[in-house]
Image (cartoon, rainbow, N blue to C red):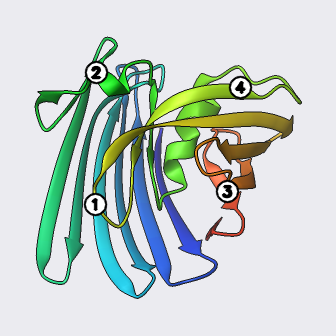
Amino acid sequence: MRRDIVWERTGPMGLEHLILDAGDTGIRADGLLVMDFSGDVVRVRYAIELGPDWRTRAVRLRLDRGGAAEEVRVARDAEDWSVDGAPRPDLAGAFDIDIAGTPFTNAMPLRRLALRPGAPERIGVVYFDMPGLAVRPAEQEYTRLGPGSFRYRSLDTGFEAAITADADGIVMDYPPIWRRR
């Protein structure tokens, strides 16, 4: 499967283009976001390598802002995570990643979890804060509301959204933030 997907932000300026390649040995997601974070316009490029089970293997994230660039690399080996080559035991127990600012990273838990209607599923994730590149553990919850309809909730912040996904588990709409073009 190869897909090109574009989302637009429904509030402040933002646009994302994702190239998704899925094969028998794994999945590669290559995304580019241009977003306004409270007047701070940034360009974010990410490359995510996933196993065929949609579990994260590696992430490279590059943020360009005001002529300066920052980059962070995260890798997962079995249950052990590292950030820029340094072990991060505080991330143990996370299976998925969540890059603030992109609807794509919701696809990983939607694809991986066997969500039953109305039964919330709590997960640990490796969270990439934006517009900085801080990497920290976070807890989230997903609940299947109906066919292609889910509730996402950040257990750290209380943020909640009802999202819709297509048959491949890729987010269509993420109100009030994103919608697919």
Q: Earlier in the sequence, mark 2 or mark 1?
A: 1
Q: Amino acid at mark 2?
A: Pro
Residue ID at (31%, 11%): 78
Quarter of the picture containing the C terminus is: bottom right
Q: Earlier in the sequence, mark 3 or mark 1?
A: 1
Q: Position of residue 81 (x, y in %)?
A: 27, 24
Instruction: For marks 2 and 1, give the CA distance.
Output: 26 Å
Rendered image: mark on residue 24: none
Name of the residue lying farthest toward the top: 78
Rendered image: mark on residue 172: 3
Residue ID at (51%, 66%): 6
Disc 3 vs disc 1: which is toward the camera?
1
Disc 2 vs disc 3: which is toward the camera?
2
| SS at mark 1 in the image | strand
Instruction: For marks 2 and 4, give the CA distance.
Output: 23 Å
Q: Amino acid at mark 1?
A: Arg
* Disc 1: which residue: 45
* Disc 4: which residue: 121
Disc 4 vs disc 3: which is toward the camera?
4
Q: Is residue 42 above or below residue 39?
A: above
Q: Amino acid at mark 4?
A: Glu
Instruction: For marks 4 and 3, give the CA distance.
Output: 21 Å
- Determine the image quadrant of residue 123: top right
| SS at mark 4 in the image | strand
* Disc 2: which residue: 89
Instruction: For marks 2 and 3, give the CA distance.
Output: 34 Å
